[in-house]
Image: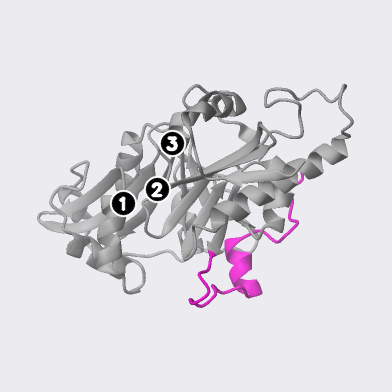
Amino acid sequence: MEIRYTTELFPCDSDRINALYGREDAYGLFAGSFAHVLAYDGDFLVGAVRAISEGVETVLIVDLRAAGPYADAESTDYTDKAVSPAEAEDYTENVITGLLRELEAGLTGRRVMLYGNREQLAVLESAGYGRCKNAWTLWREGFKEADFLPAGYRFESEFYTGHEAGTPAALKTRIIYPGGRSSATDTEINELLTKAFFGRPHDVTKTAKAFAGSQYIGTAYDGGKLVGVARAVADGSRFATILNVAVDPEYQGLSIGKTLLLELAGRIHEETVVLNTHPGAVGFYNKLKEFRRNRYVFEKHIADGTEPKRPDNPEFRSRMFTPAGYRFPDE
C-alpha cells in the first residue's frame, strides 16, 4: 500500500500516537511541537516524527519512529503476514526516509540536530545526516550505557584549543549566577555571543527571537556586566537542547562556563537534555562528569537554495562527524 504523509493532527489520532510511543502524553507532545509529520499506510499509523525549536535557527528532531508493515500499530507479529524480516526492514527505512523528507521541507535554512539510535544509523547516513562527534547528553539515571561513550573519550582526529585567561583568579568570587535572564538585554546578549564566538557577527533580531523562544536561560554577571549566557529549548516533558553557551573571552578560565552550564541544567526537568558544540570545546565538556558523550546525535544543515553550503572538506568532516559507515566495535 502507498504511504501517506501528513502534518495534520486531529484529536482522533491521540490513541494511535500514544500507542505508537507507549506513552499517554505522546499526543500532547506532538500537538505542542514546532513541527511534526505522521505516516499512514491506509488507516494505520505506521510512523511519526516531531521537532522542537525556538523557531529561528536550530531544530532538534526527536521521536523518529516507524512501526513497520503490521496489521495494526501495536502488532509486531509476522507469523500471519506475508512479510519477511528483510521486507519489514526495507519498509521501515522507507517510512523513516519519507518522514524526514516531509519534515525537512519546512526546515530550510536551519541547523538540524537529530536524536536517534543505533538501529537508525544506516538510514540516517543515507539521508545525509552526519553522526556528531561533539554531542553530549546530561546523564540521567536509567540511561543505557551502550548509547554513550566513556567519560573523557576522544576521537583520534579531534583537537582541543585551550584558553589560558589572564584574569586574576580572585575575580572568580565576584561572579554571580541569578538563575535566569535577569536584566540582560537583547543587545548585551548579542554582543556577548559575538565576542565569545570568535568575533563572528550575530544578528540582534535573530538573537532576540531565539532567546524569547527559549524555555530556560542562564546568565553570569560581574557586578552589572554580563559575562556569560546560555539557553535551552524544551518540549515540557521529554527533550531539551542546550544552546549558545558563551563566556566573555576576558573571563574564560575561571570555571564560569561550567558553573553556568550546570546551573542551567539543574533547572531543566525534561528527561533528555542534549547539546552539540564545536570541536574546540571537546576538552571542556570531557571534564564534566554530569555530561556524557552521546553516540547517536546526528546533524544536517537544510540549505534553502540561496545560502552557501557549509564546508564539506575532509578536514571539516573529520572534526565534526564520524566517517560515513563508521561503526564502533560493539555496533
Q: Is residue 208 left or right of residue 92?
A: left
226 up-or-down from 20: above or below: below
x, y percent for residue 47: 64, 38
Name the one closer to the observer, 252 or 96: 96
Of tags 2 and 3, the one toward the viewer is 3
Q: Secondary structure at mark 3?
A: helix
Badge 1, how many Cα within 10 Å: few under 14, some, many 20+?
A: many
Badge 3, how many Cα within 10 Å: few under 14, some, many 20+?
A: some
Identify the residue at image location x=61%, y=31%: 144
Chief SS of the magenta region: loop
| Image colouring | one colour
For disc 1, the marked residue is 230
Kind of residue indicated by mark 1:
Ala
Q: Magenta residues, as a range?
A: 302-331
Q: CA distance from mark 1 to mark 3?
A: 27 Å
Q: Secondary structure at mark 2?
A: strand
Badge 2, how many Cα within 10 Å: few under 14, some, many 20+?
A: many
Name the one closer to the observer, 231 or 53: 53
Q: State the residue lying farthest toward the left.
A: 224
Name the one closer to the observer, 135 or 44: 44
For disc 3, the marked residue is 31
Q: Secondary structure at mark 1?
A: strand
Query: Which of the labelled discs sits on residue 276, or is there none?
Result: none
Query: Does the magenta portion include 317?
Result: yes
Mark 2 or mark 3: whose residue is earlier in sequence? 3
Q: Is residue 235 left or right of residue 324?
A: left
Q: Quadrant of residue 158?
A: bottom right
44 up-or-down from 153: above or below: above
**Quadrant where the image shows the C terminus:** top right
x, y percent for residue 153: 59, 49
